[in-house]
Amino acid sequence: MISFSVSARDPKSRARAGRIETPHGAFDTPAFMPVGTKAAVKSLAPAQLEAAGARILLCNAYHLALRPGEALIHKLGGLHRFMGWKGPILTDSGGYQVFSLAKLRKVDDAGVEFQSHLDGSRIHLTPERALEIQRLLGADIVMPLDEPAPFPSTPAQSEAALNRTAAWLERTVKARRDEGLFGIVQGGTDAKLRRRSAEDVERHDLSGAAIGGLSLGEPATTMIEMTAAVCEAVPESKPRYLMGVGTPGDIANAVLQGVDMFDCVLPTRMGRTGWAFTSEGMLKIRNAAFKEDERPLDPACACPACRGFSRAYLRHCFAVDEILGLSMLSLHNVTYYQTLMKRIRDAIPSGSLTRLAQQESERCPPLEGRRTKT
């Protein structure tokens, strides 16, 4: 099971620092989970992730159920053994992926019937089945099947998705054994619906509350407003998880609202395309200006990419399609995010988090309209 404790609070906001205990160890919060969608964080080994500061990873039940299949992973000792990661793992049920990747889908109160984006085979996913998949995977924290409302959506669409998510959660709770189950809060961009959904999640007294259906293209200010509404409705005793967010500034500003957990593909996705998050702002290593630049990627960083290579060399790797370049930028970005989370945790008791959030927002402005989901 999952337990959560708070060790420090920000005197100027709802931010708090804490610790979450899981069957595979503990991690400090606020925490960022690198995304290993298909049981691997692209181009990075578990030892590299651990050295970068990661203590919990996210994997996706939708993708793993399609390939190689949850039964095979269970037979081979579970997800931790399968991917060589000893720490906690959170699995997303795949609700977002069903709605974004499936070729054809039919949604009703029973569940979702869809065609695999891999081979077109027909699959029926119910709340009970989504939980069973994650149980066989052996995840420490699991998510229920939910229906995210698209952005933009009408009030009727948002409420319908909320109601179906609530009904599916009811069924998931009935099928639950001892899993560390979080509820997912929906409601689109309507604060009243968000609070209503949060109250429904709390009615089940679960291990935590996740905030879903954001980072789908809405303005960053709207995302923070919805996050604040949910955090106000979720009890202080429960960890709050903002799904699929985001930039360093997004994360720091969400922590100010009371969020404890995050995941996002941005660190590795941006790294693979030649972008680095640095203490001096965003850096595009492919630029010709770095052709003869002997400086490290980020002078303030001690990761292997910054200790071992120059900007000129990393640019060369991208120019000749050498995989080392994208691996090193991905590792650097993951390190930047993990270092950011430590800075956030350290800033909370001193009351300096607001200033840190402003600095990070200036270094990397919100990626308006860009989806940051898996």
Image (spheres, rainbow, N blue to C red):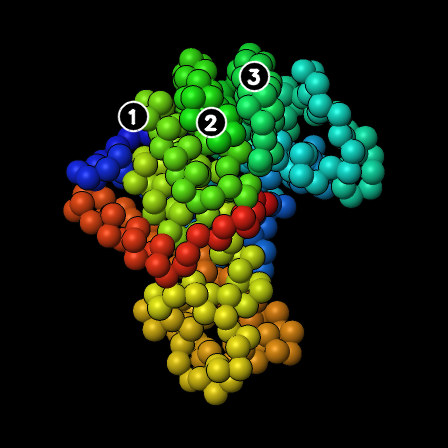
- Relative placement, left or right, of 51 versus 28 is right
Dot 2 crowding, Cα within 10 Å, few <14, some 14–19, many 20+:
some
Residue appearing at x 35%, y 59% in the figure: 362
Residue appearing at x 44%, y 52% in the figure: 366
* 1 or 2: tag closer to the N-terminus: 2
Q: Which residue is mark 1?
A: 236
Residue appearing at x 50%, y 70% in the figure: 284
Question: In the rendered view of the protein, which quadrant contains the C terminus?
Answer: top right
* 3 or 1: tag closer to the N-terminus: 3
Dot 3 crowding, Cα within 10 Å, few <14, some 14–19, many 20+:
many
Is 258 rendered above or below residue 349? above
Dot 1 crowding, Cα within 10 Å, few <14, some 14–19, many 20+:
some
Q: Is residue 212 visible?
A: yes
Q: Which residue is mark 2?
A: 190
Provide residue 26's location: percent of width, then percent of height: 37, 38
Kindly indicate whether the residue at mark 2 contacts the one at mark 1 (C-beta within 8 angstroms). no
**Mark 2 belongs to which amino acid?**
Asp
Q: Is residue 35 visible?
A: no
Q: From the viewer's side, name the closer residue of 78 and 347.
A: 347
Provide residue 367's location: percent of width, then percent of height: 48, 53
Q: Which residue is mark 3?
A: 163
Kindly indicate whether the residue at mark 3 contacts the one at mark 2 (C-beta within 8 angstroms). no
Provide residue 66's location: percent of width, then percent of height: 72, 38
**Mark 3 belongs to which amino acid?**
Asn
The numbered mark at residue 247 is none
Helix, strand or loop status at disc 3: helix
Residue appearing at x 67%, y 15% in the figure: 109
Provide residue 196's location: percent of width, then percent of height: 44, 18
Give the CA distance from mark 1 to mark 2.
Answer: 22 Å
Q: From the viewer's side, name the closer residue of 79 and 150.
A: 150
